[in-house]
Image: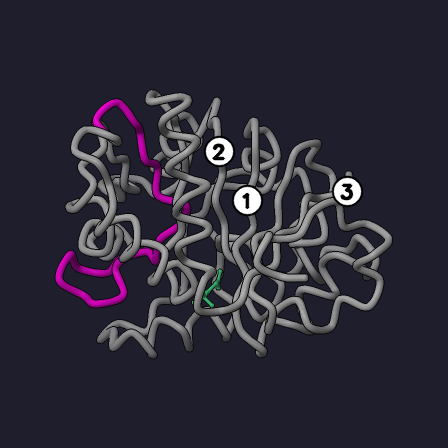
Amino acid sequence: MTPTLEVHPAAAWADAVAAALTDRLRAWPRLRLCLPTGETPVSLYAALSASADAGLWSQATVVLLDDYVGLSADDPAAGGPRLRREIVDHVRPAVFIEIDQSGDLAAAARRHDEAARGLDLAIVGLGLNGHIGFNEPGSTADSATRVVDLHPRSREAAEGYGTEGAPERGITIGLARLLDARELWLLVTGVPKAEILRAALEGPETPDVPASYLRRHPSWRVMADDAAASLLGRADRWMTHRGDTVS
Ligand code: PGA
């Protein structure tokens, strides 16, 4: 389906997305949403943490999108603690569901799949390799929530966060579950993402670019900054809306 595309100047992007999410929470305080880690949402989480009205998140449920397998809680790359530091501890949702990796990992993935059932809103980032969560290249639209072998780029990202562990595997909410969410927002910023965003939106639907399957979602929204959107040559054909701040 045609997404709604919003393009904002980089300096205004975080506040614009924060305002959109705040609107959702005001309209539906019991929002169940999944949130990603990574560099893209850092400024968004800072904006939300600074601006949240007392109680705005007090009935919301936050579900972690993905995590590396086997990192200790004090590892800087560990997703659950990272999301706590960046947003959860500040906005205090009623419930925060990390990926509980105790015991059998396949069972952990199944538990997390249950947790991600019936999301009102899936917020995801776009990997440089086209992944969504850890739905790495090769993933298809029916991919389950599961344990995955990480793509080299995802392992590099963990190393960039200063991990001691160089994790080889991750657990991710599957594309199938994300496509089930009532609404889906794709967050994309920066020049390095421009090419892969173009591939995701304008190239073929393919497992080589798992993000291309987001087009199957009936109600999805791309929230980009102008740098990430700069290569969208056919934007006028599918774009239904631009951020007010862009002419
Ligand atoms: P980034 O990661 O926000 O750190 O660029 C996005 C992703 O890999 O999903």
The magenta stretch is: 58-78
Magenta stretch, main secondary structure class? loop
In primary-sequence order, the first of circles 2 and 1 is: 2
SS at mark 2? strand
Q: Residue 44: x and y, percent?
A: 36, 56
Of 177 and 242, nearer the camera is 242
Which picture quadrant has residue 89?
Answer: top left
Q: Which residue is mark 3?
A: 2
Residue 185's disc number: 1
Q: CA distance from mark 2 to mark 3?
A: 17 Å
Is mark 2 in CB contact (under 8 Å) with mark 1? yes
Of 163 and 186, nearer the camera is 186
Camera sees residue 10: yes
Q: Residues within 10 Å of mark 1 (few under 14, many from 20)?
A: many
Tag 2: residue type? Leu
SS at mark 3? loop
SS at mark 1? strand
Q: Is residue 234 left or right of residue 66?
A: right
